[in-house]
Amino acid sequence: MSVERLLGIMAALRDRKTGCQWDLEQTFETIAPYTVEEAYEVADAIQRKDLGDLKDELGDLLFQVVFHSRMAEEQGSFVFDDVVDAICEKMIRRHPHVFGEAEVRSSAEQTEAWEVIKAAERAAKGRNVSILDDVPVGLPALTRSVKLSKRAARVGFVWPEINQVFDKLQEEIAELRVEVEAGDIDKARDELGDVLFVVGNIARTLDLDPEDALRGSNAKFQRRFAYIEAALAAKGSSPAQSDLAEMDGLWNAAKLAEKTAPKTD
């Protein structure tokens, strides 16, 4: 079995006598950043529509699960099979319309039912002090802001119209400008955070993933700046030898080229 083979490899890497020294030195804390990185690499392969890379990156992510499970097993906490059992039980519990007698007529109803079940799970674990308590702190901050505002919105703490959110964004930008002009960097940092939190609210209202939107903008910036570099190189120049006016003109040319380029499927 493939999983058994992988578990055996992990056990060999962590063997106290014959294992890999680097693997033996790792802890949950030191491995956690790699786990997050591998999840992003999975997302990147999906974004690039590269199924070959996706296969490899999913393997890397699975290895992270196996790594954490092995360290937990060494401490006598749980083993890989317990992880598998836990997710199987959770999926069955959270899909009573598939594995039970409940009825769900739409994906929206399923989302609502899912949250009701999760709330019951939190209460059973004694985690019902606040509906925001179990939104993971380790999430990317922008993603976490969306999840926090979604939770609050479910109990009515939400702007009913998106124009009100835009008004709030303008208010926060004005407050940021005041602190920037005053030269107070600490307060400016706080106000910048407020601006980004409202941006997260806009994403939630539009049912968009802000991280996905920003990844798209990052890629667009990289693509257009590469156009600037290539155009300057063709003239025997470079960005360092250019000025803002020239590069801004080339940026606009890059935008125009993208708009007029034939679309491909």
Image (tube, rainbow, N blue to C red):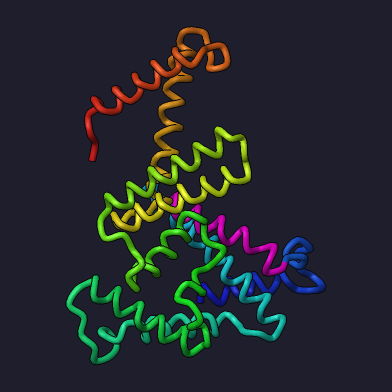
Residue 216 placement (x, y as % from top left): 39, 42
Residue occupying the point 41% across, 82% down? 119
Taking the spot 66% from the left edge, 79% from the top edge, the residue there is 72
Query: What is the magenta range?
Result: 27-45
Examine the structure image and report whether residue 36 is included in the region drawn in magenta. yes
Residue 95, given in percent of the width and then of the height, sits at: 32, 82
Q: Residue furthest top?
A: 235
Q: Residue furthest left?
A: 105
The residue positioned 29% from the left and 54% from the top of the image is: 206
* Quadrant, the C terminus: top left
Query: 193 above or below 77?
Result: above
x, y percentage for residue 189? 58, 45
Relative height, residue 51 to residue 26 (above, below): above
Task: Using residue 108 as the reference point, say whether residue 243 is left or right of it.
Answer: right
In the rendered image, the vertical position of residue 178 relative to residue 255, given as above or below:
below
Question: Picture coordinates of residue 153 (x, y %)?
Answer: 35, 67
Closer-to-camera residue (39/140): 140
